[in-house]
Image: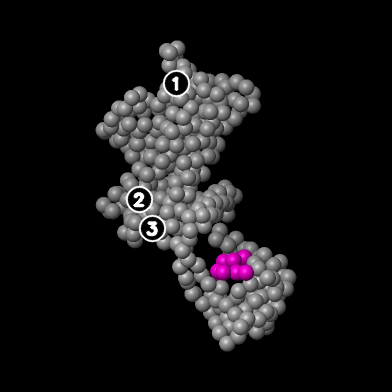
Amino acid sequence: MSTNIFAFVVVLGVLIFVHELGHFLVARLFGVGVEKFSLGFGPRLFGKKIGLTDYRVSAIPLGGYVKMMGEDPTSEMDPRDIPLSFTHKHVFKRMLIVAAGPAFNLLLPLLIFFGIFQISGTYILKPSIGEVQESSPARAAGLQAGDTITAINGTPVTNWDEMAALIAGSGGRSLSVTIQRPEWDGFTVTVTPQATMSKNIFGEDVQRYIIGISSAGEVVNQRLNPIASFVESVRQTYNITKLTIVSIVKMIQGTVSAKTLGGPIMIAEMAGQQAREGTLNLVFFIALLSINLAIINFLPIPVLDGGHLLFFLIEAVIRRPLNTRMREISQQAGIFILIMLMIFVFYNDITRIFFS
């Protein structure tokens, strides 16, 4: 339990700090005064005031905030403070300040993955065949266990994923497959993939093309230079971001059960588990959560950054701010949505603990 709590505090602290740091740095870049930089909500526990800003840690560690001067458009300001006012900045500058929080949450996994790839390299599954299924296209073409596929239609393949992608994308057309066999220098055979139905990660029936082989399970470590590490970190961040967005869409469509959503209790349990398995696992978990936090904050829900961005976008189009009453109603609706969501994920967490 203590490991779970400690890991939860570390994970949440890192995510909140990075998110609020994005808002803070871009606000200062555009000359906006920042009165408070808080990790957590509620009463101030400790901190230090440097210049205009009070850097603090607050009692409730379930979020954080940056309080900027002139953030409330209805409040009165000393004319001398107007140059530091958030509300008095151009709307596009305000949009960048708001977007910087979730943008920094996307930057964090890029840096984490870059560091992991630089330290550990990447592990790839070799395109070596462990088993050939009976009555399969591969068997008919003469492929054997122990063969290594080196190219498909002249395109070199260095790992199993590349090979599988080329087969899946064949559309059932015949492929020229180059094989390396221990007692042979290399030769080419023609294989025609067959269509089959299978379940994807969302449990949906999808058609895919296969040739009827399974991997030999040979894994090799590949060291990466800084450029390759950066490319891989961008690819990894993109793939996880895409998968997360698709998962949200599938959940809205009803394909994925909303019961899979988890709240603070689930995060604490998973953080503790990753911490026990090693620092690298915990850091990777932080990267995953950071991507999720970025996507959630970009959702156009009032109170969230995405809601503020929507208001500012409307302001940029109609060339005037939304009236105060409309903003208040929208904010109340956003708070209601978030409260309902929090209740739901807490219910899911409790159900998992006591009834699973």
Residues under labels 3 and 2: Cα distance? Answer: 14 Å
Secondary structure, magenta segment, majority class: helix
Percent position of residue 55, x then y = 32, 31
Percent position of residue 310, x then y = 57, 32
Can residue 135 be seen here? The reply is no
Q: Residue type at mark 2: give it.
A: Ala
Mark 1 / mark 3, whichever is N-terminal = 1
Q: Which residue carries the number 1 mark?
A: 84
Q: Which secondary structure, mark 2? A: helix
**Disc number lying in front (3 or 2):** 3
Q: Is residue 172 above or below residue 289?
A: below
> At 56% from the left edge and 28% from the top edge, which residue is drawn?
92
Residue 263 counted in the magenta span: no
Taking the image as shown, residue 141 lies to the left or right of residue 42, namely: right
Q: Which residues are magenta?
A: 156-165
Q: Which secondary structure, mark 1? A: helix
Q: Nearer the viewer, residue 54 or 8?
A: 54
Percent position of residue 121, x then y = 45, 62
